[in-house]
Image (cartoon, rainbow, N blue to C red):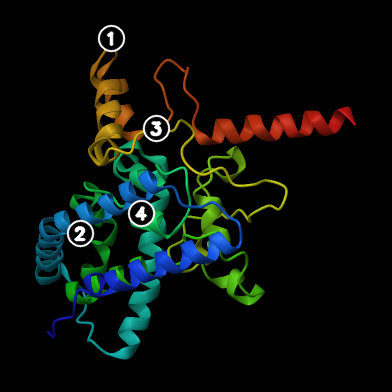
Amino acid sequence: MQEFPNIILYAIPFFILAMLLELYVTTKQHIKTYEAKDAFSSIAMGLGNVALGYVSKALVWLTLLWVYNNFKLFEIPVVWWSFLLLFFADDFSYYWFHRISHQCRLFWASHVVHHSSEHYNLSTALRQTWSGGFYTFIFWLWLPILGFHPAMILLQMSISLLYQFWIHTEAINKMPKWFETVFNTPSHHRVHHGSNPIYLDRNHAGILIIWDKLFGTFQPELENEKVNYGLVKNIKTFNPIKIAFIEWYYMFKDAFTGKKSLKNRLQYFIKPPGWKHDGSGKISDDLRKEWLDSILKTRDKY
């Protein structure tokens, strides 16, 4: 089995040049998209992710390899058509990982890092989890069972991550219609980073937007609904340690403090962000319904 290079490391100079170019373009367009402290926090989160990645990727590699060696159903060769199949299989896996990461607080605890910035630019793409790499790979375990070699899987995961870098920008409004129909774009992904009720938990795509359209989670960017970036309740910190672990702290606090049944304690790990055992919380579906109801009431007045 041939070895594949760590393309993320090779891409770091490109990331830096792209951010400088974006800063220049958005300044020319009079779009204030960068804030120094926020951008440096995002870069720090990215560097931490790369550093911890040496440990987490070793764990992922060993786990995928063990599954491949002991449970594979087929022997898929390393040829062009197998990479084509893997492209779709990996993107399908990413969609469900991403969607569940918004619907299950245990996965949200690591994924929330990526949504914690109130700005949207290429540095936001670098705002990556420090904890997710140790357990979110379970969504890809079916691939070595099918017979895809772990080296192929890790390479395709890196390709997907690289693709998603360029869509974190306000410098590009819309891509050609055919491209917007099939692929994830800056417009589609701006929606995903919005805290507006109508945009919450939408457009989970990695590379192909077709999964959102197929499974009912697609939402186009609306001209009359400007995207408000960040969280429903923003964390208001630039401290990388807090950004990385503050949701873990809140999740464990909710689960293990106060008088609750064992079932309710466990549900704080399983239920969506915003859920409360006493019914006082609001999840994204509740916020979206309230927003739509208010729109309909406003229309009825006129």
Among numbered discs 3 and 4, the one appearing first in the sequence:
4
Marks 4 & 2, CB-CB < 8 Å contact: no
Residue 50 is labelled as 2
Q: Amino acid at mark 4?
A: Phe
Disc 3 from disc 4: Cα separation: 27 Å
Disc 1 crowd rating (10 Å Cα; few below 14, some 14-19, many 20+) is few
Disc 3 from disc 1: Cα separation: 29 Å
Indicate the quadrant containing the C terminus: top left, top right, bottom left or bottom right: top right
Q: Amino acid at mark 1?
A: Lys
Residue 164 visible, this angle: no
* Residue linked to disc 4: 97
Identify the element where label 2 is drawn.
helix
* Residue linked to disc 1: 259
In percent of width and height, residue 208 lies at: 48, 68
Identify the element where label 4 is drawn.
helix
Q: Nearer the viewer, mark 3 or mark 1?
A: 3
Identify the element where label 3 is drawn.
loop
Q: Quadrant of residue 16?
A: bottom left
Horizontally, is 4 left or right of 83 in the view? left
Which residue corresponds to the image point at 72% horizontal and 48% vertical from the top-left?
Answer: 224
Camera-side residue of 166 and 105: 166
Marks 1 & 4, CB-CB < 8 Å contact: no
Q: Nearer the viewer, mark 2 or mark 3?
A: 3
Q: Amino acid at mark 2?
A: Val
Identify the element where label 1 is drawn.
loop
Residue 236 is labelled as 3
